[in-house]
Image: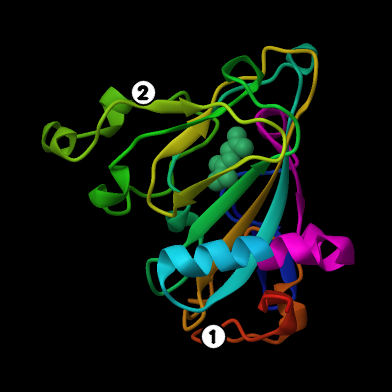
Amino acid sequence: LASSTLGGRSDTAFVDLQSLDYKRILDRRGDLRLSFPELRPIVAKTAAIAQRLLDEEVRVIYDLCFMKPSAENHSKATGWHQDLPYVPIDRRGLLTIWIALIDVLPESGALQFLPGSHRLGPLGRLDLREDIRLTDLLRADDYAFVSNPVTVSLRAGEATVHDGLTLHGSHPNATSVQRLSWALRFIPANTRWLGGPLAIDGLEETGMRPFDTFDDSRFLVPA
Ligand SMILES: O=C(O)CCC(=O)C(=O)O
């Protein structure tokens, strides 16, 4: 999840998101809300939900359209991971609202979550391309905090919400239709950037410096 933008240099911090093996998991378009003003009401509505859940004012750190290829295009599973380890911020509270843009069923690449895994703390930057089994990932004492994985089917327009520490992934898409979703990531308004790469380009345009808060207009929730 981590293509970087730092000091005017845009490169890839962890995996090459343009590589074929990554595009078989997910192809992505970043920050659609900045190009399509018609999305503003959805940003405002989802931000209100995030604000209610976090119980504090929020910023939109970025949004991503996730396109999971069809079976014909060799769709692969998204490996188990947490989002927060890829987002260099100084606190907890990263929250994703993931909206299905078409019906998403287990066979078309529905998200799966490990309930309770937010209590395990950060587990590091897991490689989304790897088919990591939960039994390899979890220590014996972790099982006291988690329950069995759940797969969440959604109708187009429905959404799920997950914490930045909730382990999640998705099944391969076994259908002939590309799976489409739009994810908005929110942070508490007083969050500070630690200076590492973010998942979208254009951060250098904001003039942000490490330890700044996210006050550029691109991060503000539209009225
Ligand atoms: O869409 C997917 O398959 C994974 C999405 C994801 O990892 C996320 O929204 O954090």
Name the kind of residue labelled 2 in the image: Arg
Dot 2 crowding, Cα within 10 Å, few <14, some 14–19, many 20+? few
Give the left or right position of residue 117, taking residue 70 as reference: left
Would you say 80 lies left or right of 11 here?
A: left
Residue 170 sits inside the magenta stretch: no
Amino acid type, label 1: Thr
Query: Any atom of ligand 1 within 8 Å of the CB at mark 1?
Result: no
Q: Which residue is mark 2?
A: 133
Residue position marked by numbered label 1 in the rendering: 213
Is 69 situated above or below 218?
A: above
Residue 162 rendering spot, x and y as whole percentages: 46, 49
Q: Disc 2 vs disc 1: Cβ atoms closer than 8 Å?
A: no
Instruction: For the C terminus, give its image quadrant.
Output: bottom right
* In the displayed structure image, the side of residue 95 where residue 179 appears, left or right: right
* Residue at (75% x, 41% y) in the render: 18
The kind of secondary structure element at disc 1 is loop
Find the magenta span and give its range.
18-44
Q: Position of residue 170 (x, y in %)?
A: 54, 29
**Left or right for 104, reference 121:** right
**Whole-number angstrom distance, CA of label 2 to CA of label 1:** 36 Å
Front-most of 156 and 74? Answer: 156
* Residue 75, numbered circle: none
Could you tell me residue 212's position as x and y percent?
54, 87
Q: Quadrant of residue 38?
A: bottom right
Judge whether residue 43 is colored magenta: yes
- Relative to 145, say whether 92 is above or below: below
